[in-house]
Image: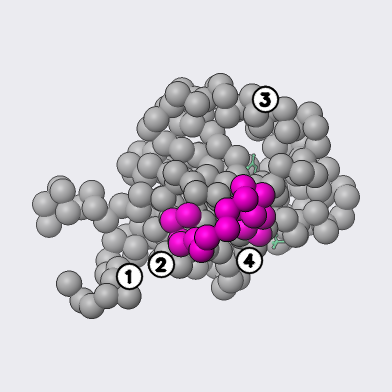
């Protein structure tokens, strides 16, 4: 296989469902928030690894529309972790040439955090090596409902097609995920990239997110590279 072919086998958009932080902490008799902190450290390193692989879009499911149902202490802890990340880590991300983007509903996000999110997006807007997409208060069903409601609001009356709908999604310019990884042994999508995952490849591992390292990423990418994607067509 020549270099050109090799390049084609790297996902353009890699998405990860970060799961297992709580169980990772429990295994160590630590509070759940320690698991989320360990998960954040792992994520910081993953941004560098993903960039090195030549992946152009990297999205992570960090907080779903359903996660508000967790105990207040955990929700507050996660919100402060997001604030900490923006305050302390955005410069490093920018130096890597990465643009930070948030994906999800804007309601319910605490005001201070919402402001910081906007700032981080503006501050990194010109970076063009990697789009690092943090899905916070994201739900695939919510995204579709929001898109449909916005189409109704626009006054449109004639039938729409798939491209029309996509224009109303949170990040219309981002290509659909090629590969979706879920850690911690759960075998479901949990409302992540619901529409966009129609032709995504999936990779599941039992490893808890805070233990997901470079070797694990390599395994997932190698597995993906060996798959044939047919998009409903026939073998090429
Ligand atoms: C799922 O594990 C994980 C979350 C709900 C939070 C993920 C968040 C992080 C890794 C921090 C990310 C920080 C930024 C800035 C994006 P779980 O709690 O459901 O684990 P469990 O299933 O073992 O209980």
Answer with left or right where residue 154 lies relative to residue 66. left
Q: Which SS class for mark 2?
A: loop
Against 183, residue 129 (above or below) is above
* Nearest to viewer (mark 4 / mark 1): 1
Q: State which region is magenta.
A: 145-164
* First in residue order: circle 1 vs circle 2: 2
Distance between the alpha carbons at the discs numbered 3 and 4: 29 Å
Residue indicated by mark 2: 199
Answer with left or right where residue 199 lies relative to residue 86. left
Q: Is residue 150 magenta?
A: yes
Label 3: few (<14), some or many (≥20) within 10 Å? few
Residue 235: % across, % down = 21, 76
What secondary structure is the magenta-colored segment mainly?
helix
State the mark number for residue 190: 4
Residue at 28% across, 71% down: 230
Answer with left or right where residue 121 lies relative to residue 225. right
Residue 139 in view here: no
Residue indicated by mark 3: 87
* First in residue order: circle 1 vs circle 3: 3
Residue 218 in view here: yes
Please identify the quadrant where the C terminus is shown: bottom left
């Amino acid at each position: 296989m020549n270099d050109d072919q090799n390049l084609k086998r790297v996902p353009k958009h890699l998405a990860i469902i970060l799961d297992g932080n709580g169980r990772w902490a429990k295994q160590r008799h630590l509070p759940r928030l320690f698991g989320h902190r360990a998960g954040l450290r792992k994520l910081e390193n993953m941004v560098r690894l993903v960039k090195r692989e030549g992946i152009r879009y990297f999205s992570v499911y960090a907080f779903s529309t359903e996660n508000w149902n967790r105990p207040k202490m955990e929700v507050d802890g996660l919100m402060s972790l997001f604030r900490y990340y923006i305050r302390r880590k955005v410069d490093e991300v920018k130096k890597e040439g990465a643009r930070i983007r948030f994906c999800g509903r804007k309601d319910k996000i605490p005001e201070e955090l919402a402001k910081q999110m906007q700032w981080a997006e503006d501050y990194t807007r010109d970076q063009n090596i990697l789009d690092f997409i943090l899905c916070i208060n994201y739900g695939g069903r919510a995204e579709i409902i929001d898109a449909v409601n916005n189409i109704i609001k626009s006054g449109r009356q004639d039938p729409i097609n798939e491209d029309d709908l996509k224009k109303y999604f949170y990040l219309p310019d981002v290509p659909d995920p090629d590969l979706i990884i879920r850690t911690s042994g759960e075998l479901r999508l949990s409302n992540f990239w619901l529409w966009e995952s129609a032709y995504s490849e999936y990779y599941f591992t039992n490893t808890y997110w805070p233990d997901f390292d470079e070797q694990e990423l390599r395994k997932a990418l190698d597995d993906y590279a060996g798959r044939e994607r047919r998009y409903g067509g026939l073998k090429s």
